[in-house]
Amino acid sequence: MKPSLPLTLATIAGAALNSTGCSDSGASGPYLVNRELSGNEKNLRLVETSAERFRYQTAPSNPQSGSGAASVAAPAKPTGLTYTTPEGWQEAPAASMRDVNLSFGENGEGECYVARLPGMGGGLLANVNRWRGQMGAAPITQEEASALPTKPLFGQPAKFIKVDGKFAGMGTAESKDNYRMLGLILASNAGAVFVKLTGPRELVEANEDNFFIFTSSLDIGL
């Protein structure tokens, strides 16, 4: 267990929610990525009191997964972000709106990214329904959003969504049939973190374990 430390929002994720990107090249297999952040980014905090400080854990050395392999994440630079890249996933081209941008699938048709926004980022309900709208799904109520299951993200319970439908990402004119979206939303008054994965339904289904290998490995360096 790493010592408790305040979580700066900037050490976690990118500058906004929506951006697209994919890649059909690059090395596969587990590795770590660091990114230096600006002074303004370093000043953003996800939690504001010592009582709310996170205790971070790296991914287990032998995760139970039938669809990929992973390794233990190692410390990054003081302001860096570390994570495990599941087997068959690779770095996608850098995107200004994303801190982490990965692709998977034979032609890079699956994508997964991490993003952040100061404050509540619009709130849980608005973001869940925005993502559902990208899949052509009907909006849900506040009660239904509050009842969504949770999965760990940076040691905290993040709301998990899974939606099937016809995917049309932001700024995309063409919809893609038979797609699936997986997502985690961790939001507070001090900041929000978003992890979103999309791709053909069968491909995403085969990579759901890898999604959780990735999200459970997300960490910050000391």
Image (spheres, rainbow, N blue to C red):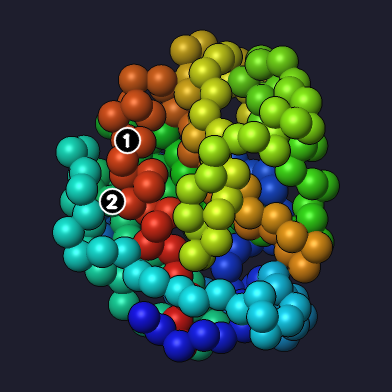
Write down the quadrant of residue 48 in the picture: bottom right
In the displayed structure image, the side of residue 31 where residue 50 appears, left or right: right
Q: Residue at x 63, y 54 (%)?
A: 186
Q: How far is the residue under mark 1 from the one under mark 2?
A: 9 Å
Whole-percent x, y for residue 151 in the image: 48, 48
Q: Position of residue 123 (x, y in %)?
A: 79, 46
Circle 2 residues within 10 Å: few <14, some 14–19, many ≥20: many
- Kind of element beneath mark 1: loop
Instruction: Tell me if residue 107 can be seen.
Output: no
Residue on which the image places disc 2: 86
The residue under label 1 is 207
Q: Residues within 10 Å of mark 1 (few under 14, many from 20)?
A: many
Give SS at disc 2.
loop
The answer to which quarter of the image holds residue 45 is: bottom right
Give the amino acid at mark 2: Pro
Q: Nearer the viewer, residue 27 or 136?
A: 136
For the residue marked with disc 1, what is the amino acid?
Asn
Q: Is residue 120 above or below residue 88?
A: below
Residue 49 shows in the view: yes
Residue sitting nearer the eye, 190 or 44: 190
The total of numbered circles placed on residues is: 2
Residue 130 position in % (x across, y down): 73, 31
Q: Is residue 8 above or below residue 96?
A: below
Would you say 41 lies left or right of 176 here? right
